[in-house]
Amino acid sequence: MAYGVKIAKGDAYKRAALKRRHIRVRKHISGSPERPRLVVTRSNRHMVAQVIDDIAGHTLASASTLDVSIRGGEGDKSTLAKQVGALVAERAKAAGVETVVFDRGGNRYAGRIAALADAAREAGLKF
């Protein structure tokens, strides 16, 4: 099945390229009740991580740099991403989730994305 994303210029082209990569990743990744999807959304300033059951269409746990416990924290963006990873893993385990499928959201697995994933693994989440 072909997915079309309109090609534009400048920032719109970057968004379209990100959308194409995310569609390409999502062809192979889906969350289930036994193994939900840990999806990471990255902007220039913030990170959001959600544990989603795609079959039921529910978010089981989430964490963000906008959370009260993380917002205004010390350190660079990678340090804040590590805090988000640890927090989402803690909340997922409280919701009864032990194993997840990692969805990098079309982003490269490096930098803040990798820092979040490593922190979630250290906190006991398996993927």
Image: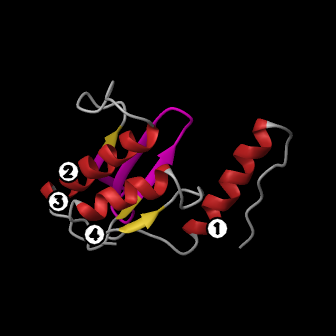
- Residue 45: say if magenta: yes
| Number of residues whose C-alpha sits closer than 10 Å to that of mark 3, classed few (under 14), some (14–19) or many (20 or more) | some
Residue 8: percent from left, percent from top: 85, 42
Q: Of the residues tagged 2 and 1, which is closer to the observer? A: 2
42 to the left or right of 67: right
Say which residue label 1 marks: 24
Residue closest to the eye, 42 or 97: 42
Residue 90 lies, with reference to residue 56, above or below; the image says above
Are the two marked residues, 4 and 2, in contact with CB atoms closer than 8 angstroms? no
* Residue 53 visible, this orientation: no
Residue under circle 4? 33
Magenta stretch: includes residue 59: yes
**Amino acid at dot 3:** Lys
Are the residues at dot 4 and dot 3 in contact (C-beta closer than 8 Å)? no
What is the quadrant of the N terminus in the image? bottom right
Q: Amino acid at mark 4?
A: Pro
Between circles 4 and 2, the one closer to the viewer is: 2
Camera-nearest residue between 102 and 24: 102
Q: Where is residue 12? Give x, y as percent.
A: 77, 39
